[in-house]
Image (cartoon, grey):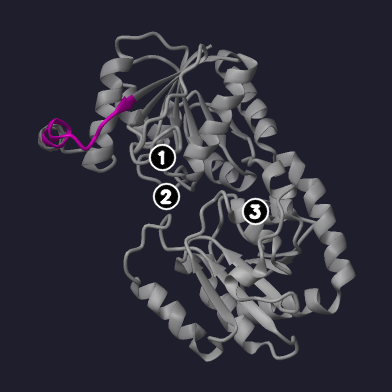
Amino acid sequence: MKIAIITSGRLPVPATKGGAVETKLDYTLDYNAEHHVHDITVYSVKPDKPVDKNTAENHYIHYDMQTLWAKIGRKVYSWVNREAYYDNEIEFFLWRCMRDIRRRHYDCIILANRPGYILSLKKVTQTPVVIQINNDYLQPATRKARDIKEAARLVITCSDYLNSRASQVVSSTQTPVVTVHNGIDIGRFVHAKAADRSVLGLTKDDFVVFFSGRLTREKGIVELIRAVRSLHGIPRLRLVIAGASFYGKDRAATPFMQEIQQEAEAIRDQVVFTGFVDYQQMPSYLKMADVIVVPSMWEEPFGLTVLEAMAAGVPLIATRCGGIPEICEGCAQLISRDDAEHHIAEAIQHVYDHPEEARTMARRAVERSWDFDKDTFSEKYLQALNIVNT
């Protein structure tokens, strides 16, 4: 098929600035280039550094949204279009994409985690549209949810949890909703060598509890700190917190980060804040841990950090929420979010007290993680698009 992919309008593809959706698209496009499945054109904002990944199968159209012309155009567009679904920057990016799409023929158009795009897009083309969902962006409370679902030929979600949410949207059409679980480069995590603990001021005798991710309230970092603070039965217990509030761009401590630091003050000799860790280094950092905790306090759409911990072969504790159980049921300690501090502390103590059981579960997690390899994901994702032609 001849396919167009319209990206978020925020982060570029190729994923030079990271981003889960953008990285996932990179995996799919690399697989497509190797296996010659479809002819794909990607519409994206301009990358922050020169990169050319055009192939016979993959084509990239980049729009520089930071030029003076783009800024003026965005302002004019906002005056003319008062009922935009997203903000002016995103809507102006979509308008530029649509101008080009109207001049071309595609067999289907994929909207990467921007379901609201479809409302404007269907005004200019009859091409079948596929909505790809990585977050809880299509569910009964979503603005114009029924209109969005009825306009789509197919909805692809990254977890059964999101599938159930999208399926709850009542519509007059029988729009299929299918799950294609996310994938990562499993081999990078499985085969990584552990980082030298001394880099973080740790020793081989420390029992290291590791957290990685954005430092936002819903990620449960406060609950984790309080849990560690309550533990007194583990000698040389250390907590490593790897992350920043938004993709490493913090220039000053946010109010929530200040709150985290205050929570950790009582055990400051036990806590290491690494700041942002480059994704390329993350496998080695995970490998140095004795246990990894993913204490999400919200309905996690999928949970890539869970998958990364599994592939790293480190015992894992995670909350039972959203799509997390789909990934690690049977190979991690899943705990309730209710009274989370108590359950986290109890689970950490259990890992410490039962090391052989923890290692067995970690080995099982590595085996399970291969089901979510990037190539497996890409193959299933591209196959799912065939539903458009049925």
Residue pointed to by mark 2: 141
- Within the magenta stretch, is there residue 144? no
Q: At x 69% / y 49%, what residue is drawn?
A: 189
Q: Nearer the viewer, residue 289 or 334?
A: 289
Looking at the rendered structure, the secondary structure element under dot 1 is: helix
Q: Residue 145 bears which disc, if any?
A: 1
Q: What is the x, y in percent for residue 267? A: 56, 88
Q: Label 2 amino acid?
A: Ala
In the image, residue 286 sits, relative to residue 153, either above or below, namely below
Tell me: 20 left or right of 357: left
Give the answer, above or below, for where 129 lies relative to 242: above
Q: Amino acid at mark 1?
A: Ala
Q: Position of residue 264 (x, y in %)?
A: 51, 83
Gap in Å between the C-alphas at discs 3 and 1? 38 Å
Residue 123: in sight, yes or no? no
State which mark lies toward you, 3 or 1.
3
Callout 3 touching callout 1 (CB < 8 Å): no
Residue 59 visible in the current orientation: yes
Expressed as whole percent of the image width and height from the top left, the position of residue 368 reads: 79, 47
Numbered label attached to residue 283: 3
The region drawn magenta spans 62-72
Give left or right: position of 143 versus 291: left
Disc 3: CA contacts within 10 A as few (<14), some (14-19) or many (>=20): many
Image quarter hosting the C terminus = top right
